[in-house]
Image (cartoon, rainbow, N blue to C red):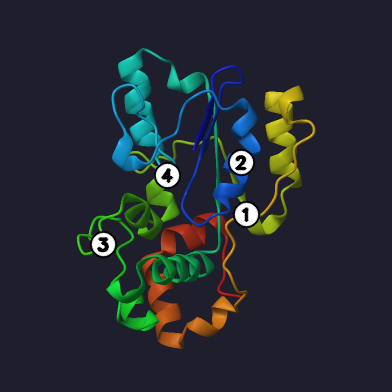
Amino acid sequence: MRISHKSHLIYFSIPKTGSESVREFLDPISEEKIVHFTEISESTPFYSHMRPCEVKNVFFKKGWNFDVYMRVATVRNPWARLASLYKMMCRNWGDRWQGTFAEWVYGLDPTGRSTNHMPEKWYAHGLMSMTNFLSDKNGELMVDRIFRIEDQTTDFHTLLITRAGAPLNEQRLMHTNQAEQSYEWQTMYSKETQAHVAELYADDIARFGYTFG
């Protein structure tokens, strides 16, 4: 997540949606310190993968008007996003996970709540459907613009530069935090696991217009 009070702009960072690249791009205009979720405090309440509903609560406590900020986010093909999350989990946790990809898929929870076995908040938010991540308790989206990372970055880049002005004119959006080795995420799925993800994340697939291919 990044917050610019001067530009009245908030970028919400859903895990595994190209968000690290956007965060680096917005660093020159971000005016709030973003900490690891284990380090949040009254003076530093914001962390990287913070949901809009959480941010709105902090703004309310501080007496800031959440509604005057342009709120943007990026999304990604749900099957590709989950495959990437699995790869990251295996890299970060090693032998803490001994199961197969299919076993992991059948244990997914798109609400992000059933993660007691691996309680890191970024992981819970990574499992959460992107619709849930961006919505309030009534299911209403809390962002103004959503960009699919597969659709190139021109419109998103233009919007950010227009909103922020000169500090971003020389910046470029770069893809960071890529997997160490490229892989074909489609080959990780069987027909059964593909269908299971389609059922669990039907809200994202319908809302953002994704297909498996």
In the shown orientation, is residue 169 left or right of residue 208? right
* Above or below 177: residue 79: below
**Residue at (69, 56) in percent of width and height:** 151
Mark 2 residue element: helix
Viewer-nearest of labels 2 and 4?
Answer: 2
Q: Please give the residue where the numbered disc 3 appears in the rendered image.
A: 118
Sequence-earlier tag: 1 or 2: 2
Q: CA distance from mark 2 to mark 3?
A: 27 Å
Kind of residue indicated by mark 3: Met
Viewer-nearest of labels 4 and 1?
Answer: 1
Sequence-earlier tag: 2 or 3: 2
Q: Position of residue 55 (x, y in %)?
A: 38, 30
Q: Please give the residue where the numbered disc 2 appears in the rendered image.
A: 24
Q: Are marks 1 and 3 in contact (CB under 8 Å)?
A: no
**Residue at (40, 81) in percent of width and height:** 193
**Residue at (47, 82) in percent of width and height:** 189
Q: Position of residue 182 (x, y in %)?
A: 62, 74
Which residue occupies the extreme top position in the image?
A: 63
Q: Are marks 1 and 2 in contact (CB under 8 Å)?
A: yes
Q: Please give the residue where the numbered disc 1 appears in the rendered image.
A: 176
Kind of residue indicated by mark 2: Glu
